[in-house]
Amino acid sequence: MKTIITYGTFDLIHAGHIQILRRAKEMGDYLIVGISTDEFNKLKHKEAFYSFEDRKLILESIRYVDQVIPEYSWEQKIEDIKKYNADMFVMGDDWKGKFDFLKDYCEVVYLSRTEGISTSLIKRNFSNRDE
């Protein structure tokens, strides 16, 4: 069995999220998704619209996702790769090169992002409507 692992905040789930999860799942048999906890998001100066528990519930209902785990820190990725025997680490190509140090533990793949959609864009569009 080939295990894939990926991480993100996964706030305001959109088609780009679904595409990257589908493509990651197609690369293996079992997809683990680490989602940033609310506390970790605060450390990253990132604000999610939905709570960790709501984002976890939403991700667990996506058919491509086999398991959802909490992400507490940047450093836990190596521990998770070992703990879950991950064969491949997958991230969007906006992170290209930033996780190459994980190549000592598993294959690292950066997938192209879906053009024209992002959580930041959605948030900007909503805030512009209020003006």
Image: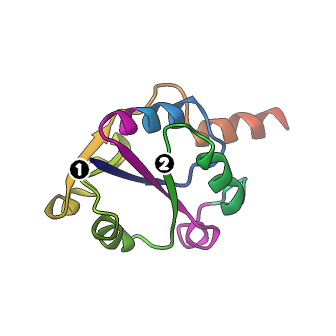
> Measuring 46% from the left and 38% from the top, which residue is drawn there?
21
Extreme-front residue of the structure: 1
Q: Nearer the viewer, residue 46 or 72?
A: 72
Q: Which mark is residue 108?
A: 1
Q: Nearer the viewer, residue 66 or 98?
A: 66
Label whose residue precedes the other's in the sequence (1 or 2): 2
Tell me if residue 108 comes above or below residue 25 in the rendering. below
Tell me if residue 127 comes above or below residue 37 in the rendering. above
Location of the C terminus by quadrant is top right
Q: Is residue 98 magenta?
A: no
Q: Which residues are magenta?
A: 23-46
Residue 90 position, x and y percent, is 33, 47
> Measuring 29% from the left and 57% from the top, which residue is drawn there?
86
> Which amino acid is tagged 2?
Asp
3D distance between C-alphas at marks 1 and 2: 19 Å
Badge 2 crowding class, 10 Å Cα cut-off, few under 14, some 14 to 19, many 20 or more, is some
Q: Report which residue position mark 2 lands on.
A: 66
Q: Is residue 42 magenta?
A: yes
> Measuring 25% from the left and 44% from the top, which residue is drawn there?
109
Badge 1 crowding class, 10 Å Cα cut-off, few under 14, some 14 to 19, many 20 or more, is many
Residue 11 position, x and y percent, is 63, 49
Helix, strand or loop status at disc 1: strand
Which quadrant of the structure image shows residue 9? bottom right
